[in-house]
Image: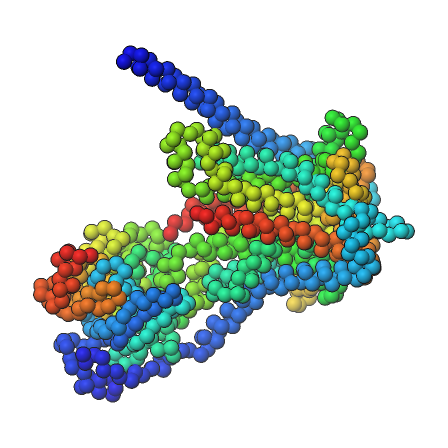
Amino acid sequence: MAINVMQDTVISPKLSKSFRRNFIERIIEFGLLISAAFAVFITTAIVYVLVSEAIPFFEYVSVYEFLTDTVWTPNYSIKRYGILALISGTLTTTFIALLVAVPLGTITAIYLSEFASHKVRETIKPILELLVGVPTVVFGYFALMLVTPFLQTIYPDLTTFNMLGPGIVMGIMIVPYIASVSEDAMRAVPMSMREGAYAMGATRFQTAIRVIAPAATSGIVASYILAISRAVGETMIVAIAAGQQPTFTFNPVDSAATITAYIVSVALGDLEHGGIGYQSIFAAGLTLLVMTLVLNILGHWVRKKYTERY
Amino acid sequence: MVATQRKTTQKKRFNDVVKAESRNLDFYYADGTQALKNVNLDVYENKITALIGPSGCGKSTFLRSFNRMHDLYTGNRYDGQIVLHPDNTNILDKKVDPIEVRMRISMVFQKPNPFPKSIYENVAYGLRVRGEANTHVLDEKVEEALKGASLWEEVKDRLHDLAFNLSGGQQQRLCIARALATEPEIMLFDEPTSALDPIATVNIEELMSELKKKLSILIVTHNMQQAARISDYCAYMYLGELVEHDLTDKIFTNPSKKETEDYITGKFG
Amino acid sequence: MAENNAKQLKDLDQIRALIQKHKKNDFIFAFIGMFIIASLTITLLILFLDLFFDGYPRLGLEFFSNYPSRKAIQAGILSAWIGSSLVLIVTFLVAVPMGIAAGVYLEEYAKKNWLSDLIEINVSNLAGVPSIIYGLLALGLFVYSFGLGQSILTAGLTLALLMLPVVIVATRESIRAIPVHIREAAFAVGATKWQVVLNHVIPYSYGGILTGVIIGMARAIGETAPVITIGALTFIAFLPPSPIGTEAPFLNFDWLQSGFTVLPIQMFNWISRPQYEFHVNAAATGAVIIVLTALMNGFAIKLRYDVRKKIKW
């Protein structure tokens, strides 16, 4: 057909690309990219700073000794740096927190997702969000001034600084995290599954426990992992109420320092830049970063599995 | 010069002036599927050309090539040309700025999509993008466009109300006013009435017949009655290919291809 | 026949009994759920009320206008609340533009490639890094490498790093809610990408972004660990130089280099004292922080609710 006859087309100056406008657009895009890439810079900087400050520390203390010794006495004449003394405190408080937060958080999530009416849910979720917003220093005050004295009425031998009180308060603090992530996971379970269960005559409770919770397992597990990560990195509650004396113990009624509490206690004193004390907080920080990083990656991986399923 | 030359070399099929033509147009989506295969189609000045065909036949893809909407998503690829007259520009050329193309060829979408701004700002936006800042000029052009979209009488007292407060039909006419304000040469309509009730549909159809006095219209429609009612030319597409393109009367009374006839009589599609 | 009927009826009775039993489980669980939530709420309410009652004797105007002092009764939070305000100004000015820019880039510009994947991973990872690690970063980088010292600028930047992921996530979420056809409508009349972003994307996601910003700021007010880690002083009886000068250009930036304290550190400092009178001060400071953060969070939650209700595309 004649239409197919190809003609050379022309480009009017009006239609050709505006150099100036394209240039400005490119500059803006580049500026936005830099802002976004800043996140990569921060991560790199974190790793770089922690590693570069920790390296001289590990020239002084061998990695083997650091990881296996159970005594942490940076202020004594015989200085020993066994991170296990700090890790024991971190793990004990985290464990207590989980004992509180996992059952409370899971039940709250199941209740909100499967039992509560729309209205109830809309009232409770903002309360949980407000709870997330409470600064940890205030929680620390509660642990020291209210929870520990209360525990002392039951168990009079409890010392002022102990891991039980802050552990419990930390657990309360973490409940909303578990509740909200688990609830999201359960709400993501398709309605058809619920209908299937109800159609067979199951009650709400049976549906929730036998169908919904198993289907949302990976999301619920992810919420636990994120909760552990929170607890491990939590600082002020333990720094205020668990004591700042590094001790290798798993006994909740003992006073002990966590990794985070040690960093705070050193930072509060006079820091000699470049000294072994200064470097030791970076070695401790590096340990903490590795722990939370492993947990976060694990949590991310588990969570991704469930989003892929539906 | 070039344009006149062209007219002499090309056999004229109809007695109307060609406003734009696609030449050997192929289109590939980012995933590699070919949505248009060698489409050659003329759009005539001051006429309505309707594109019909079953869903997925490529008619919307073809329409969206005319204002380079596909450029918004990476990986899409055009082959061939769409030539705009009288200046004989291939608007698919890499050197042509898609933004300039969109300033000459405007579009009305399937679902009314006003911005969450005032009625006035919706219409004025295209002008503002062009750098028009003079309030008097803006006022004048907004009024003109709203009149052109036969919406002025209904909204003149509440120009600064949020556009979302209008009814569906009014919103779509507002979108037409928005597209009209910049005085485009061609207006593209992508199933403009599929989300509207029958009365609003009639309003829009009447409006289109009015609009073609000023510009050329290319419309995609699912509704064959609509194509028959309003268009001057009609093109039937199937599986990314142009099956038949002719005067609407001819297509609906005496199509030359069997496939077209099957589609129009409802045996298929 | 009659026997059969009787058997069916007996079965029916059994089923009904079973259902009754199961329904009891439903009821018990619902009760436990409500009980847990209620007791959690009530416990917290008691804790807060206790904080207010403990701190009440100190909560007067003087508390806000006095410097910290060796005498608990005369001590106030003047330097702390001014310090917090100045630090937050820096945090806001850094985190908000950068966070919005990063969010806009990731949603509107980023193409699917290794770079955008890398950025994605980093943003989600940063949100999970404990805040004290940011403190160590700031100590090594801002305080010593950049030589910014233990200043308001350092603290502001540190908290900005913490706030950045919050703003980015909020920006992205609210941008994602804007339907594609609104963008296409703007492009169709000839807008450039940046015009689409500036005239449409950012204005329409404004509510969601603001929510994220307020929540992030509320968190920054209460952050203690990273600010302690950079070595903020706990006893400050002076104010930073005023940001507003008496001579042109009426702005001076000396305050950025000043030493400072913030509200949560002041509270921590008072908790750490053995004397009871200082604990009263700590409670009063805690009450101030709680009211501030609760007001901000409450406002943000309400704002988000309103935004969700208002915009129906």
The x and y percentages for residue C214 are 57, 50
Quadrant into which the N terminus of chain B falls? bottom left
| Residue at left offset 39%, top offset 28% | A201
Locate residue B32: give its quadrant. Answer: bottom left
Number of on-image labels: 0
Which residue is more in the foreground, C250 or A130? A130
In this image, B259 relative to B113: left or right? left
The x and y percentages for residue B40 are 23, 74
| Residue at left offset 30%, top offset 56% | B111
| Residue at left offset 63%, top offset 61% | A42
Locate residue B128: give its quadrant. Answer: bottom left
The x and y percentages for residue B186 are 26, 70
The x and y percentages for residue C98 are 57, 61
Q: Residue furthest left?
A: B254
Quadrant into which the C terminus of chain B falls? bottom left
Which residue is more in the foreground, A172 or C23? C23
Which residue is more in the foreground, B131 or A73? A73
Q: Is residue C45 above or below residue B20?
A: above
Q: Can residue C79 be seen from the camera position used here?
A: no
Q: Can residue A82 be seen from the camera position used here?
A: yes
Which residue is more in the foreground, B55 or C234? B55
| Residue at left offset 46%, top offset 21% | C21
